[in-house]
Amino acid sequence: MKAVVSQANDATESVEIPRPTPDAGEVLLKVQAATINPVDVHVRSLLKTFGLEQGQPVGLGWDVVGEIVEVGPGVSLEVGSRVAAVQSDGVAKSSGTLAEYAVLPAEVVAEVPVSLDSIAAATLPMNSLTAAQGLDLLGEAAGRKLLITGAAGAVGGFALVLARRLGFKVTGLARASDADFVRSTGASFSAALTEGEFDAVFDAASLGSAVFVALRDGGAYSGVQPGNVPTAERGIGVQAVQVVGDGPRLAEFLRLAESGEFELRVAGSFGFEQAAEVANRLSRGGQRGRWVLVP
C-alpha cells in the first residue's frame, strides 16, 4: 500500500509498504481522509529529543477517518462502519495514518455522524483530544482565568470552546487578524501578553517560559510539547500533554462538531504525490485549518 513516511534525511516521501493486518482488539481501516499535523513535520527532531532516532523511515499521520474493512479477534465493531480515531503509538512507528490503510485499537475509534464530511472530520481527533487532555492537566476550572496561546490554531481553537464549557474565564492570545475568530467562540481576545493576569495558561503555541509573565505566582502551565517543557519558576506548576486515543471522548467531540459548536477548518486536501509539498508548506507555520490527505 502507499504510505507517507519521513526518511532518515528528513525528507517526506510517499512509498510502498506492506498492508497491515489487525491483531486481537484491533480494526483495519481503509483510509478516507487523514490529516497532516505539525508533529509530522518535526518528527525527526522529536525522535532525537526522545533518543529514538534509528535512521529508519517513520510513518506519518495521527488523525484518520476511514471505513472498517477487517476486525481482529474480540472486536464487536461492524465491518463497513465509518469511524474516526487518533493513532497515538508515539513518533517512532513504521506506519501512520497518512496511508491507504491503518490499524488501530478498537477502543480509540468513534463512529462519525452521517452529516459530517470525512475530510472535515479528519481534522478533529488529534487536535480536539490534545486540547481536552491539555486542559485536564490544569485542574478544576472554578471560574479561574485562563489564557490560551495560539488560540486561532487547530488545537487552540478547540481549546477555546472546551475551556469555556468547563467554566474557565477564557482569553485567547492570537494575531490581530484572528480576533473575530477568537471572539466568535465566546472568549475574550488579546494580541499581547499582560503581566500576572492569569491563573493558568494552555500554551498551544509553544511559547514556553515567555508566557510565564502572564501567570500569577503559583499558577498552572500546560504545554503541548512533552520533550520541551519550560523550567518551573515562581511556584508555577508545569506540565505537558501527550495525547492518547479515547474513543468515547472523541465520539462526544464529533457530536459537538455535528451540532456546529466545534468549527472544523480545512486548509485543503492533497494526494500522495503532493505530500512533500504540503509538509513544506506546513513547516512554515501560520496555517488556519489543517491539510488533509485523500488517498
Image: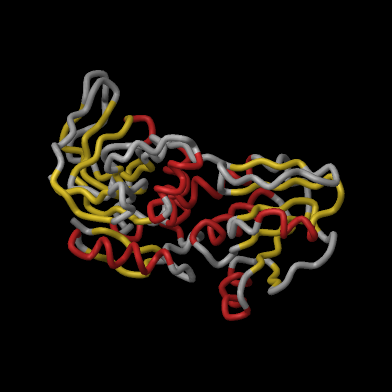
Any part of residue 247 in sight: no
Q: Is residue 129 left or right of residue 117?
A: right
Q: Quadrant of residue 23?
A: top left
Query: From the viewer's perspective, is residue 200 above or below residue 197?
Result: above
Regarding residue 225, the answer to whether it shows in the image is yes
Q: Name the residue at 30% across, 47% down.
A: 8
Number of numbered discs overlaid on the protein picture: 0
Q: Residue furthest bottom?
A: 177
Residue at point 22%, 40% (across, down): 29
The quadrant in which the N terminus is found is top left
Residue 148: image location, x then y, percent: 65, 59
**Residue at image point 35% right, 38% down:** 109
Camera-side residue of 32 and 215:
215
The colour mode here is secondary structure
Q: Quadrant of the C terminus?
A: bottom left
Using residue 261 as the reference point, say whether residue 108 is left or right of it: left
**Horizontal and vertical percent position of residue 45:** 45, 48
Left or right: residue 177 versus residue 125 is right
Where is residue 41 shown, x and y percent of the image? Answer: 39, 56
Viewer-closest of 288 and 272: 272
- Residue drawn at (73%, 55%) of the image: 146
List x then y, in percent, for residue 162. 59, 52
